[in-house]
Amino acid sequence: MPALEFSEGDWDAVIDVNLKAAFFLAQQVAKHLTERKAPGKIVNIASLLSFQGGIRVPSYTASKSGIVGLTRLLANEWAAHDINVNAIAPGYMVTDNTQALRDDPKRHDEILGRIPAGRWGTPEDLAGAAIYLYSDAARYVHGHTLAVDGGWLAR
């Protein structure tokens, strides 16, 4: 929906789910870990729109941009507690959320034409990034947002 037509209710609903919930969930996890002096990993879900403006999705773009900033802030505060906070930024994925785009031949072809990998991603394509960020191999990675986008941002 265009920004000129976006309601406060539409705005709040997306911000609450994508940004507010992520913050308070991470806060509870970090409280639990710091009370026990235990190391931990938090991986937030950002988006390609964390890096680009997009169109017709103002609250989604704002919330996912906010996730990147929140990830950096939490990483700065919690790295000293041995808590890694990072994010994954998926590209265009085959999900219910992208069904309308995939069903629109013009938009589908525009999007697919921009993805160097030549295909839409699948949720399974995110697994390797998540495994890495949750593993000991990423123990010195703090505040990073890893794009899993088939090369979209490289264009």
Image (spheres, rainbow, N blue to C red):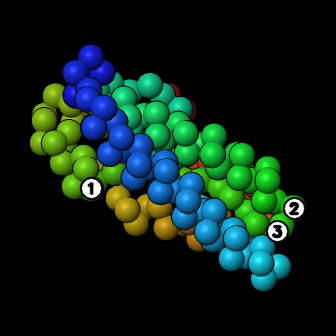
What x and y, as percent, mark residue 111?
A: 30, 33
How crowded is the residue under tag 1: few (<14 C-alpha within 10 Å), some, or many (20+)? few
SS at circle 2: helix
User: In the rendered image, which quarter contains the N terminus?
Assistant: top left
Looking at the image, residue 66 sits to the left or right of residue 49; the answer is right
Mark 2: which amino acid? Ala
In the rendered structure, the answer to whether residue 152 lies left or right of residue 132 reads left
Q: Is residue 149 shown to the viewer in this render?
A: no
- Residues at marks 2 and 3 touching, judged by CB atoms closer than 8 Å: yes
Q: Residue at x 65, y 55 (%)?
A: 86
Of 47 and 16, the residue lying toward us: 16
Residues at circles 1 and 2 in contact by the CB criterion of under 8 Å: no
Judge left or right: residue 55 versus residue 34: left
Q: Nearer the viewer, mark 1 or mark 2?
A: 2
The residue labelled by disc 1 is: 95
Q: Residues within 10 Å of mark 3 (few under 14, many from 20)?
A: some
Q: Earlier in the sequence, mark 1 or mark 2?
A: 2
Residue underneath mark 3: 82
Residue at 27 percent of width and 37 percent of height:
10
Secondary structure under tag 3 reads loop
| Residue 7 in sight | yes
Real-space Cα separation, disc 1 to disc 2, in angstroms: 37 Å
Q: Amino acid at mark 3?
A: Asp
Residue pointed to by mark 2:
80
| First reached walking from the N terminus: tag 1 or tag 3 | 3
